[in-house]
Image (cartoon, rainbow, N blue to C red):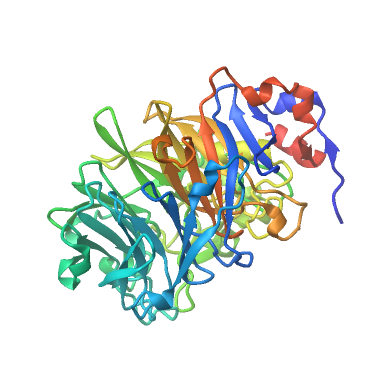
């Protein structure tokens, strides 16, 4: 039965927030772009174009997108067609242009290798050619990187490690680095080593061969003792799974996200060897800034402190230079292994008898308080019983878990590259903002419009992060795979970023409505920033590839010259009347 809705009175909006405003604003596409900002300082954002891959919903019609400023073309990985799409971005020069055309589609069969998929694409810093990652037919075997012209003509290919899943060039364009994830077989009969391939592309790309490839494995000597091992029967070399790579501005070091292992690796590019693998540690949800909503069975927004230690487990990462230092930004999505032959996933309630909670592991609880939480139903479904957790976590001498472990930080973090220590984390910002923005669709899934569906898992699920400089200010852009939309933070102080703006072109059509073409742009997967001096429009642009909707949204970005332009023409009452909420959920949120 559809729940009754009502408009929020102005007073309720004031109670929610006077600093974060919700202003659906018209775009060139005559659609609603939901835009939320802090005070009057948020970026002006406009949806100026969209590419529609034509793929069915949730088939991966667009996944990773890169841009060539020399030809004004974009290159998009199309998982549905197992192809690379080449798009003509010059049409954005025309006022009110909304549809970005497909120039050509390069299917897997034309890449000249025996492969199963196209997983990633990168463009050489000087332009001229692109590189595409293509796993083998059997993903546990060595995969390929294929080099193509910007017209999509194959030039050459080389063999790399198992399951190449992401690739990036060094800033000078002399090397191409490939994250070979090395996932196990479904039955876990084979678990290939995770590696990084370093490809020398300094010579004529047309003559490149496998001799130019060095594939770097992990040496257990440089792996810190507390780095998480998921599968007890595997070696570290087999267990570590490179997910994403970023390179510092000098091209000296690469930093590699090991998502399932909740770790970060440092690779000396010249020496072609790993020099460190460091655990990222745990995010303590017992302290005030790290609250979370842990259940999808309480029918309420319930963001509060819990005795949960969550692994950060970043997916996308990027590097950022400021004040003479290198910082690494991470989108802390979270991921657990779940294969037919081995699964670490379980629910807290399913292993409740295996807990012996120890207050020494939490900053926010003493032992008496912890024991009372358990006595009062901590393991019930409405509390922590539904939370997804892992069996691959530390136990004490009695064989008990001394903490409740979550996966995914539901945040983005800044790490100091030299020490790989945490410099900043956005805490519970993403869920707090989402609760104000979407009281009816908080922690929604990305396959249907739902309420509270993902609270027991990874919440809004930050997937990717990039940076961009807009009119002299550096910003971080973080895509939320489940909730949808982009969070924006001002990086003027790298160790203390400030929330600036949230925007989304996802359209919620009603609770339990499936995602359709009318849902707009759903599940941002890959982000690319295009600076104004390389843009076909002369504006700073953000390209966001949305995996579920199979679309690429193009947003123009601009700093406000005179405060909040969008809000200046709207009264608080106007803003209030643009938001619909269920009263029960609103009261629940305000009571926290």
Give x and y (percent) for residue 432: 61, 37
Q: Residue at x 34, y 75 (%)?
A: 191
Q: Is residue 60 above or below residue 557?
A: below
Q: Residue at x 69, y 58 (%)?
A: 517
Q: Is residue 204 above or below residue 467?
A: below
Answer whether residue 310 is visible to the viewer in this image.
yes
Q: Residue at x 67, y 35 (%)?
A: 436
Q: Is residue 180 above or below residue 37?
A: below
Q: Is residue 430 above or below residue 134?
A: above
Q: Which one is nearer the viewer's eye here, 232 or 56?
A: 56
Give x and y (percent) for residue 539: 48, 35
Q: Quadrant of residue 139?
A: bottom left
Q: Residue at x 65, y 26 (%)?
A: 566
Q: Which one is nearer the viewer's eye here, 444 or 309?
A: 444
Quadrant of the frame with the N terminus? bottom right
Q: Quadrant of residue 319?
A: top left
The outermost residue toward the top is 562
Give x and y (percent) for residue 164: 34, 67
The outermost residue toward the front is 94
Answer whether residue 591 is visible to the viewer in this image.
no
Give x and y (percent) for residue 3: 85, 49
- In the shown orientation, is residue 565 left or right of residue 190? right
Q: Which one is nearer the viewer's eye here, 124 or 294?
A: 124
- In the shown orientation, is residue 13 left or right of residue 66? right
Q: Say how many tags the image has.
A: 0
Quadrant of the frame with the C terminus? top right
């Amino acid at each position: 039965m559809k729940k009754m809705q009502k408009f929020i009175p102005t007073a309720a909006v004031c109670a929610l927030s006077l600093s974060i405003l919700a202003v659906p604003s018209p775009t060139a596409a005559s659609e609603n772009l939901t835009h939320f900002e802090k005070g009057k300082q948020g970026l002006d954002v406009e949806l100026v174009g969209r590419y529609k891959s034509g793929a069915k919903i949730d088939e991966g019609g667009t996944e990773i997108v890169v841009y060539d400023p020399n030809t004004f073309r974009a290159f998009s990985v199309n998982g549905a067609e197992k192809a690379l799409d080449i798009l003509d971005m010059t049409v954005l020069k025309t006022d009110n242009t909304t549809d970005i055309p497909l120039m050509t589609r390069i299917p897997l069969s034309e890449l000249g290798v025996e492969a199963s998929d196209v997983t990633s694409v990168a463009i050489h810093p000087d332009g001229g050619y692109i590189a595409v990652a293509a796993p083998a037919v059997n993903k546990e075997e060595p995969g390929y990187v294929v080099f193509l012209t910007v017209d999509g003509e194959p030039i050459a290919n080389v063999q790399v490690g198992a399951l190449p899943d992401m690739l990036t060039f060094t800033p000078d364009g002399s090397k191409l680095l490939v994250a070979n994830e090395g996932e196990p077989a479904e039955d876990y009969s084979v678990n290939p080593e995770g590696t990084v391939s370093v490809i020398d592309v300094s010579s004529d790309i047309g003559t490149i061969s496998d001799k130019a490839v060095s594939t770097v494995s992990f040496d257990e000597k440089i792996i810190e003792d507390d780095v998480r091992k998921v599968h007890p029967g595997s070696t570290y070399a087999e267990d570590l799974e490179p997910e994403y790579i970023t390179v510092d501005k000098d091209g000296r070091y690469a930093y590699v996200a090991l998502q399932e292992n909740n770790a970060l690796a440092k690779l000396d590019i010249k020496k072609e060897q790993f020099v460190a693998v460091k655990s990222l540690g745990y995010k303590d949800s017992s302290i005030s800034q790290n609250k979370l909503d842990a259940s999808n069975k309480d029918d309420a927004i319930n963001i509060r402190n819990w005795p949960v230690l969550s692994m950060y487990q970043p997916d996308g990462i990027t590097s950022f230079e400021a004040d003479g230092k290198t910082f690494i930004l991470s989108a802390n999505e979270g991921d657990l292994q779940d294969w037919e032959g081995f699964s670490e996933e379980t629910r807290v309630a399913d292993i409740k008898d295996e807990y012996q909670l120890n207050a020494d592991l939490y900053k926010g609880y003493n032992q008496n308080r912890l024991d009372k939480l358990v006595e009062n139903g901590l393991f019930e479904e409405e509390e922590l019983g539904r939370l997804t957790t892992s069996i691959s976590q530390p136990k004490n001498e009695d064989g008990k878990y001394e903490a409740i472990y979550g996966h995914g930080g539901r945040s983005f973090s800044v790490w100091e590259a030299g020490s790989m220590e945490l410099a900043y984390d956005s805490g519970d910002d993403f869920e707090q903002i989402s609760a104000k923005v979407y009281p009816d669709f908080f922690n929604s899934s990305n396959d249907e419009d739902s309420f509270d569906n993902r609270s027991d898992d990874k919440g809004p699920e930050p997937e990717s992060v990039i940076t961009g400089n807009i009119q002299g200010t550096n910003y971080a852009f973080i895509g939320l795979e489940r909730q949808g939309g982009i969070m924006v933070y001002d990086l003027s102080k790298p160790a203390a970023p400030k929330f600036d703006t949230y925007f989304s072109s996802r359209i919620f059509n009603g609770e339990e409505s499936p995602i359709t073409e009318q849902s707009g742009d759903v599940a941002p997967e890959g982000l690319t920033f295009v600076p104004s001096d390389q843009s076909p429009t002369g504006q700073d642009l953000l390209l966001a590839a949305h995996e579920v909707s199979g679309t690429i949204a193009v947003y123009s970005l601009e700093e406000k010259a005179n405060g909040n332009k969008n809000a200046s023409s709207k009264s608080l009452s106007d803003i209030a009347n643009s938001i619909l909420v269920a009263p029960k959920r609103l009261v629940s949120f305000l009571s926290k």
